[in-house]
Image (cartoon, rainbow, N blue to C red):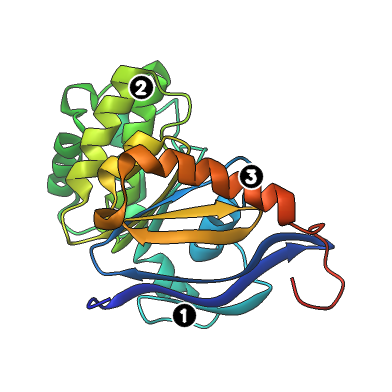
């Protein structure tokens, strides 16, 4: 790929009892890349991000984040990554500034007041930094959650369905924030249902269906007009040929 690997997964799988959430898959992400992963509900997208974020251990396979093995260097890995999930992890009874101050101290961010001012500017919330988070709209909370996530300058940012529930204006504002984060200094993986937004931002697009990575292509080789048909066909094919997602001691 010509770039140092930030994420390298080989034969990665995850199962919960008899249920296979992720069949063995290989995934690589280069430094500065933006990967959009598309998939329907239940495809395994959130499970994949949780494994990469070290919140879950894989059932099999190998994962290296920034050259480190999370099972051996979990603390070092977590200091260099961040996850934006369905939960904002914000305290609604605190101001936006107080939230970032709390997280910045936890991560021991240097020159914290200056850094907080920088991230407020990046997400367009400078004028609201002294307001209680409980007064924020969903879109504003999502942007503040992203500010929280990259406050400590992580090299890998994981975003799980960041557009869900946002109105068009909030989605547009979020898109501008994410485009600004795609600056070559950090790598990003985003799961989304929003095909147009996901393709607009990414360097690569992947499709995850039924716990299987069925498509992975560089953006320059993708026709935006044809991608939706490719996505729908992948879902249909997976439903048609997928065996019961149960573990019997053999292969997937």
The x, y position of residue 40, in whole percent, is 58, 41
In the drawing, what numbered circle is on residue 132? 2
For the residue pair 2 and 181, the one nearer the viewer reads as 2
| Marked residue nearer the N-terminal end (1 or 3) | 1
| Marked residue nearer the N-terminal end (1 or 2) | 1
Residue located beneath label 1 in the image: 73
> Label 1: how many residues lie within 10 Å, few (<14), some (14-19) or many (20+)?
few
Quadrant that contains the N terminus = bottom left
Residue 99 appears anywhere in the view: no
Mark 1 vs mark 2, foreground winner is: 1
The x, y position of residue 179, in whole percent, is 21, 43
Is residue 186 rendered to the left or right of residue 243? left
- What's the distance in space between the residues labelled 1 and 3, CA to CA? 40 Å
Going 31% across and 31% down the picture, which residue do you hit?
96
Residue located beneath label 3 in the image: 236
For the residue pair 25 and 86, the one nearer the viewer reads as 25
Mark 2 vs mark 3, foreground winner is: 3
Quadrant that contains the C terminus = bottom right
The relative height of residue 75 versus residue 36 in the rendered view (above or below) is below
The answer to which image quadrant residue 178 occupies is: top left
For the residue pair 170 and 203, the one nearer the viewer reads as 203
Going 60% across and 46% down the picture, which residue do you hit?
235
Going 59% across and 73% down the picture, which residue do you hit?
12
- What's the distance in space between the residues labelled 1 and 2, CA to CA? 36 Å
In what element is the residue under mark 3?
helix
The x, y position of residue 19, in whole percent, is 79, 58
């Amino acid at each position: 790929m010509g770039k140092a690997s930030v994420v390298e997964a080989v034969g990665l799988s995850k199962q919960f009892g008899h249920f296979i959430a992720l069949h063995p898959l290989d995934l690589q992400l280069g430094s500065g890349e933006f990967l959009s992963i598309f998939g329907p509900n239940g495809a395994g997208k959130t499970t994949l991000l949780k494994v990469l974020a070290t919140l879950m251990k894989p059932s099999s396979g190998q994962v290296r984040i920034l050259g480190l093995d999370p099972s051996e260097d979990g603390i070092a890995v977590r200091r260099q990554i961040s996850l934006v999930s369905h939960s904002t992890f914000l305290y609604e009874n605190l101001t936006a500034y107080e939230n970032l101050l709390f997280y910045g101290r936890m991560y021991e961010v240097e020159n914290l007041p200056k850094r907080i001012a920088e991230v407020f500017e990046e997400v367009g919330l400078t004028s609201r930094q002294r307001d209680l988070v409980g007064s924020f709209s969903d879109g504003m909370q999502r942007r503040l959650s992203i500010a929280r996530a990259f406050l400590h300058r992580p090299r890998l940012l994981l975003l799980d369905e960041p557009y869900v529930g946002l109105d068009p204006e909030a989605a547009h504002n979020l898109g501008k924030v994410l485009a600004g984060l795609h600056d070559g200094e950090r790598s990003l993986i985003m799961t989304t249902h929003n095909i147009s937004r996901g393709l607009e931002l990414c360097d690569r697009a992947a499709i995850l269906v039924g716990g299987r990575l069925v498509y992975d292509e560089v953006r320059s080789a993708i026709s935006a007009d044809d991608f939706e048909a490719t996505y729908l066909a992948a879902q249909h094919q997976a439903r048609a040929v997928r065996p019961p997602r149960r573990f019997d001691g053999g292969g997937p």
